[in-house]
Image (tube, rainbow, N blue to C red):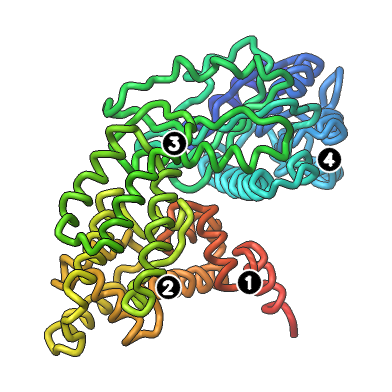
Amino acid sequence: MYKVIIVDDESWAIRGISNAFDWEQYGFEISGQFTSAYQAWEAIALQEPDLVVTDIRMPEISGLDLMKRAKAQGIDSEFVIISGYAEFEYAQEALRYGALDYFLKPLDVDMTDTFLAKLALHFSRRSEARNHLLLDALTSADEDEIRRCLPAGMSAGCCQVLAVHYEADRPKLSELLKLDGQPVHVLEVENGASTLLAVLITEQESELEGITDEWPAAAGSPGLPVVGISSIGSGLKQISKLIKEAELAASRVFVDEASGAVHYNPKLPLVKPCIDELHSIVHGNQYDSIETYILGLQEYFRLHELGMIEVVYLWNQAVGLLTSAYSEELRDMELEFLNYAELKERFEDLESLCSFLHDVLTVLRQGNSRALQEGDILSCFNRMVAYIDRNYEQKLYLKELSVQFFINQVYCCQLFKKNLGKTFSEYVAELRIRKARGLLQQTDLSIESIAIQSGYVDYYYFNKVFKKHCGMTPAKFRKREAERSRRP
């Protein structure tokens, strides 16, 4: 909800402003109403509301003075001026100092809904722009850039990050963390449609210890978000690393259906027996044990409560082992080193990843003898490609598509390289980025909305993929295209 403070030296005018607008319907809540401009200023300085609706002429401090003070103090509140004086000079001066709008008393109730809808759109776009700038800064590891995005006066001795994945309503962290009276700043930033990052900033490490201990931790409880909790780091430069830790911890859902709190706790040595067993299968020609190995792998990860960092390690070790032993046989099977965001984009869960490894090992056992030129396989493959062309904005996993179109997923990988000259992941990414480019050029949708419409729910991952394909971020691409369109 966007916070609103109403200021007018006449109480009847405040009631009129409060009642004339359906604030709640458009996402606003009135956090203060003041007939004293001095008291209003104290509340503005303390709360830093999103919007201040104020009379222009008041006996103590004018509405323009309130606006000037806020700007001088670096308070980023927006102002709407409402006055009983129709002189154009007042409106002109208010707009010159940055007021969003200027209205005369009494308010025309017929225009209130239109105005609030316009206001809500303005704040939504402003919030998205701020969010993107803040996310880019926090993940940059550039201390100066991060500091520029922090509220004035906020210093950082120690930091901790929470990554909250939720399916329903956005959780209220202030209620869950119970930080009242504690010297801890919470910086919230959205990372896509259903992930919230919360950066906890304070001076002393002791002030962060135990804060997350009471977070609901009942695995599998319906309705609970999953919250990944990073370690505690020193200084702003650590925030980028802590975000990765929190995201890795929250990604435990890739392995099982856990909910509640998951602390970042790497257990990489526990993955070694899994790698050793795979080495024995590949180099000892023990392919008869494939089924047992794959089933045991999933159970092993759940039993030892291993998470995404261990999945990434397993995958990349397996890729290295398999491609070094069978470089020619596995050349077109889309076996490449991936980070955790890329793994989540490619595989739905650990079971899906293990299924792919199973199919790769099965092909090696069979000697890759099946002919790829068979007409029935190519016909199924062409139907699959047509389906992808129509549905690339949706979540697409090769395992599900291979079942739907009756092709082993390993053969699918080979067919993509053989017939299209690119991997499945590359083909889908090109379709999505092409759509994103068009939306950036032709619409004024937010970049987050464009990411979602193009098939990406993770804004930060979308940024990385777009930059990889286009050489610049979506924001810079949109700016460049807008400048080009204005040239004669």
In the rendered structure, which disc, 4 or 3, sits on the residue that comes first in sequence? 4
| Residue depicted at 65% across the width and 38% down the height | 239
- Judged left or right of residue 333, residue 478 is right
Closest to the camera, between mark 1 and mark 4, is 1
Three-letter amino acid code at the position of disc 4: Tyr
Residue 149 placement (x, y as % from top left): 73, 41
Q: Which mark is residue 426?
A: 2
Please name the amino acid that badge 2 sits on.
Glu
Q: SS for tag 2?
A: helix
- Identify residue for label 4: 90
* Marks 1 and 2, the one that precedes in the sequence: 2
Examine the rendering and report whether any part of residue 116 can be seen: no
Q: Residues within 10 Å of mark 1 (few under 14, many from 20)?
A: few
- Of the image marks 2 and 3, the number of the one nearer the N terminus: 3
Q: How many marks?
A: 4
Circle number at residue 267: 3
In percent of width and height, residue 180 lies at 60, 12
Label 4 sits on a secondary structure element that is: helix
As drawn, the label of residue 471 is 1
